[in-house]
Amino acid sequence: MREYEPDGRFDRAVGKGSADKPGSIGPTGRPFPKLPPISDWPHTRPAMIIAMCNQKGGVGKTTSTINLGAALAEAGIKTLLVDFDPQGSLSVGLGVNPHTLELSIYNLLLGRDTEIDEVISPTNVEGLDVLPSNIDLSAAEVQLVSEVAREQTLLRVLEKIRGEYDVILIDCAPSLGLLTVNALTAADKVIMPLECEFFALRGIALLTDTIAKVQDRLNPKLEILGILGTMFDPRTLHSREVLERVVQAFGETVFHTVIRRTVKFPETTVAGEPITTYASSSPGAAAYRSLAREVLARCHGG
């Protein structure tokens, strides 16, 4: 049963009709902008590298990386997903068993005999490839400490294949350690998924501080592309209040697209495929297609 607030705030929070219709008021309380379809954007090679980053776990980083990448690939944007989390969740979410991998991104970071083409795997989505990871990557954080230019290690790996893709998305580990610093050093842009929950909101200040340090010392071209509200439940006052506070604090940095809670996302992980193929007509798939348009518009200055 739908829940309504006595003053009608539910309808204002949810927005009547589809939230991605131009001019409609979405969950962020702002009119949704008019965005061209993905097919209208030019292919951009070498690839735009985007890091999905938040030191708090369970905020939807991996889900957003998989489904944003799938939405881009669906429209002909050749995309590579980089699993840079030792838990290997992104690999699992795309049907890769991290326990049976002979080669992973760990071998590329610390080995000299492995070619990147040996590690990249195609997915079931045309135009979407994955650079898988497993628990071996946890050792890289310690081993990289003694390396020369240790913060640029991932960048050196990705530069070799950057000309083959339009977009590279990096799924960062839930920490602000050396692996995450590597991802931010390699990236052109960073997206911060934020669960619409109070404790997740507290971590954004720490993350933005880390990004500022990377910009100052390692990667001056790094830019925050946007903050993505995830796990939004419009039925709860808490969820709506957190999203409202985020918009008040960060303004236009917050994406208009908001990802709502749905049982479909856990199901897609079990199925090992993105929501754009598992439940193509679902609201979750529509949300990530909308996010893909917003991301391209911001990347191209639209």
Image: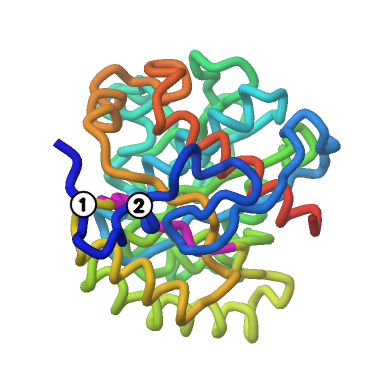
Residue drawn at x 67%, y 70% as measured from the top left: 222
Front-most of residues 119 and 216: 216
What residue is rendered at 65% in x and 46% in y? 22
Q: Position of residue 271 (x, y in %)?
A: 29, 17
Residue 228, magenta (yes or no): yes
Q: Is residue 151 above or below residue 211?
A: above
Question: 206 or 119: nearer the eye?
Answer: 206
Q: Residues within 10 Å of mark 2 (few under 14, many from 20)?
A: some
Kind of residue at disc 1: Tyr
Quadrant in which the N terminus appears: top left
Q: Is residue 35 magenta?
A: no
Q: Is residue 58 visible?
A: yes
Residue appearing at x 33%, y 20% in the figure: 272
Q: Which residue is mark 1?
A: 4
Residue behind mark 2: 11
Residue 48, given in percent of the width and then of the height, sits at 72, 49
67 w.r.t. 254: above or below: above
Query: At 50% across and 44% down in the image, what residue appears?
Result: 19
> 30 or 214, which is in the foreground?
30
Q: Nearer the viewer, residue 114 or 254?
A: 254
How far separated are the C-alphas under marks 2 and 1?
8 Å
State the image quarter where residue 70 is shown: top right
Mark 2 in CB contact with mark 1 (< 8 angstroms)? yes
How are the residues colored? Answer: rainbow
For residue 248, which numbered disc appears in the image? Answer: none
Residue range in magenta is 226-233
